[in-house]
Image (tube, rainbow, N blue to C red):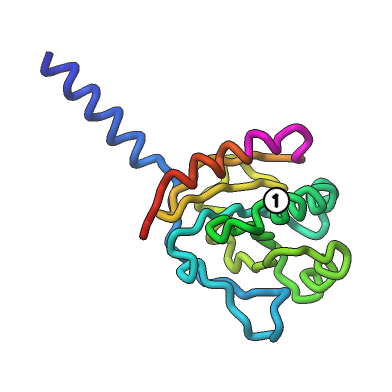
Amino acid sequence: MMRNFFAAALFVFGTAANAAAIPMYDFPLKNGESRDEVYKMGDHKNGVFVFEAYRLSCGYCNENAPTVDALATEYASNARVQVLDLGLDTQDSEFAEWIARHQPNHPVIQDTGRRVYNALKTSNGVPQVFVVNCQGQMVGNHVGTWDGAERKIRGYIEQALKTTCE
C-alpha cells in the first residue's frame, strides 16, 4: 500500500514538473500605434492566450494566417481570449512584411529570445500554436497547419477558460 502511495505521488509530482508554464511576459507589439508599444499579458489577468508561433519565411505559417484571423474574429466578443501572432523573426522589416501581407485583426508580438516558444514547444518547427491559461500553464498545442485542427484548438480554449485567476 505504501509503495502505491509513493508511486502515485511520484506520478503527480512528475506530471506537475513537466507541465509547461510561462510568466506573464511583456512583448514588443509590432502592429501597434507606435513603435514603442508593448503588449502586456499582465493586462489580461484572467486571459486565455492563443499563441500562433510563426516565421515570415514559413509557407505553412502564411497559409495559417487567415484561419488565425477567423479564430480572433470568432472570439472577439470574449475579452478573456487573446489571439496573438507570436513572431520568431528578428528584423523589424520581417514583421512589417507579415503585417502588410496578412493585415492581422489581432496583436502581432515579437518573441524576443524565443522565451515563449522555447518554454512551450513540444517539437521544433513552425507553425505551432500554444493555448495558455491565465496561470501561464499550457493547456494544449498543435504543430503544423490548421487543416482540421480548429476543433481541437477550440477545445483547448474552452478548457483554458475553465481556469480563472480573478
Q: Which of the pair 162/57 is nearer the observer?
A: 162
Query: Does residue 117 show up magenta in the picture?
Result: no
Residue displayed at 81% across by 46% down:
60
| Image location (x, y in percent) of residue 112 | 60, 68
Residue at x-position 63% and y-position 85%: 36
Q: Which residue is mark 1?
A: 74
Percent across and percent down for residue 27 are 57, 71
Q: Residue furthest left?
A: 2
From the viewer's perspective, is 64 left or right of 86?
Answer: right
The magenta segment is 146-153
Considering the image in quadrants, where does the C terminus appear?
Answer: bottom left
Quick check: 32 left or right of 27? right
With respect to residue 67, does 13 lie above or below? above
- The amino acid pointed to by label 1 is Glu
Task: Give the residue furthest to the right.
Answer: 101
Q: Where is residue 116 drawn, in percent x and y?
A: 54, 57
Q: Is residue 63 left or right of residue 20?
A: right
Q: What residue lies at 24% left-to-right and 24% top-to-bottom?
A: 8
